[in-house]
Image: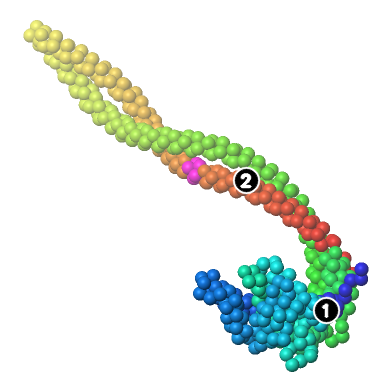
Amino acid sequence: MRRLTFQQQVWIPLCLALASLVVVSGFGLMQVRSTSLAERERSLRYAGDMAMSIVRRYAALADSGTITVAQAKREALSQLRALRFGEDGYVAVVNSEMFSIMNPAKPETEGKYLGDYRDADGNYVYRAMAAVAKAGHGGFVDYWTPRPGSSMPIKKRSYVEPYTAWDWAFVTGAYVDDIDAAFYRSLGMAIAFLVVIGAVLSTVVVFSNRRLVRALGGSPEYAKSVVRATAAGDLTLCIQVRPNDQDSLIFQIAEMQAYLRNAVVMIQRSAHAITLAMEEIASGNLDLSQRTEEQAAALEQTAASMDDLRVAVHRNSDDAQAAADHAQEAFVTATRGNEVISTVSETMHKIAKSSSQVGEILGIIEGIAFQTNILALNAAVEAARAHDHGKGFAVVASEVRALAQRSSASSRDIESLIQKSGEQVQGGSSLATDAGRCMSQILGTVQQVDDLMKHIAQASSEQSTRIDQMARALTQMDSVTQENAALVEQAAAAAQAVRDQARELLQSVSRFTVA
């Protein structure tokens, strides 16, 4: 089956719209005609009901004995003959034997047999009416008959209402040519309206199609083929654009294809570059991760060694502080010893001075002993001269001389001892002086040692503080290095993810074919 072109397809809505208008108009006209016929049939039914009510009233009078049945029929027919409705409507009465009982329009037919009467189409009209009456309920009968004073047959619709008690059938009729005329008149107006509307819509569709084709820049089939090729990844298709076309869909598709081609080329190049760069970054991140882990391990070992060194330096600082304390005690002891040596030296000088004074006293004692010895000699001489009278005095003089000699000998011994003691005291004083000088030197050395130990203790404390700071810094460096290692691993994972995405991007744009 041949497919419709776009130019043919754009006419389909117009044809459908016109067909819908035709159907709607026809349906409306049929509804109007049906409504008019229904109104006409209601008027016929109403006339039949009026005739039935008149007859029933007189039948009731006859049944009550007020009048006879014959009088009741005459009075009923008299009123039915005068009954009119509509423009030319009347009521006729026939029986089941198809005899005319009363017909105001054709009095000459009253009492005659009408079963053989045919209309212009050859239909037995009264036979049909009799059949409706025998059915026992009202019904309609259509036939063709001319109007009074005319020979042109016109369609007429009659309503038959039977009254079985008197074997009557009331026939009411009305011509329906005005309804058909109104229908055909409305049909002509509807056709004219449809023609005008069709012409206007056709004009609008023609101009709209031209504008649509101008806006499209070509047939939608061509645009669809171009879009299909672009969606399939073929960007090498040369799109045909009409001359001086700068705003149509085909032109915009061509522009889009050019932009897309440039974008795909740039994406492919960038994807290649990103893939290579991310591969290098991923490799570098892996190496950096390994080196960072090694550095973290080395830092951890360094931190452990620094912790041991910190403990050792703390111990050295404590030992240096203890040594400084001992040096301070030694300095205090040396100072006290220096003071004692100074006191000993002064005491030795005083002893030496006292020894010289004792020597002087011993000289005086030796002089006294010498003088006493001389006096004893003189006394002995005088005692010898005195003979017997001087014997006691001679004994005393002898004793005194012996005492003087012993005193002199003791003095000489004491002098010798004092001389030896003086020499020893002089040596002791020299030694005390030398000891004082040595103690002064020791005190200076101890003071230097104390100062040095203080400096060492202070330096050890400062070293301990700095080593603590270095240990904390190494701990922080170790923590930061561990975090850096984790970040490097994350960066490596991110680089690998970006590399995979770049590969996927490259693979996704590789379906596009560019020149």
Report which quarter residue 290 is drawn in. Answer: top right
Q: Nearer the viewer, residue 308 or 206?
A: 206
x, y percent for residue 145? 76, 84
For badge 2, the amino acid type reads Gln
Q: Which mark is residue 482?
A: 2
Q: For label 2, count other residues whose C-alpha is less than 10 Å away and answer few (under 14), some (14-19) or many (20+).
A: some
x, y percent for residue 282? 75, 52
Q: Height in image: 419 above or below 462? A: above
User: How far is the residue under mark 2 from the one under mark 1?
Assistant: 118 Å
Q: Is residue 280 left or right of residue 427?
A: right
Q: Nearer the viewer, residue 157 or 409?
A: 157
The residue that disc 1 covers is: 122
Residue located farthest toward the top when viewing the structure as drawn:
388
Q: Height in image: 145 above or below 339? A: below
Q: In the image, what residue occupies the spot 31% across and 33% down?
A: 343
Q: In the image, what residue occupies the spot 32% across and 24% down?
A: 421
Q: In the image, what residue occupies the spot 64% across and 69% down?
A: 164
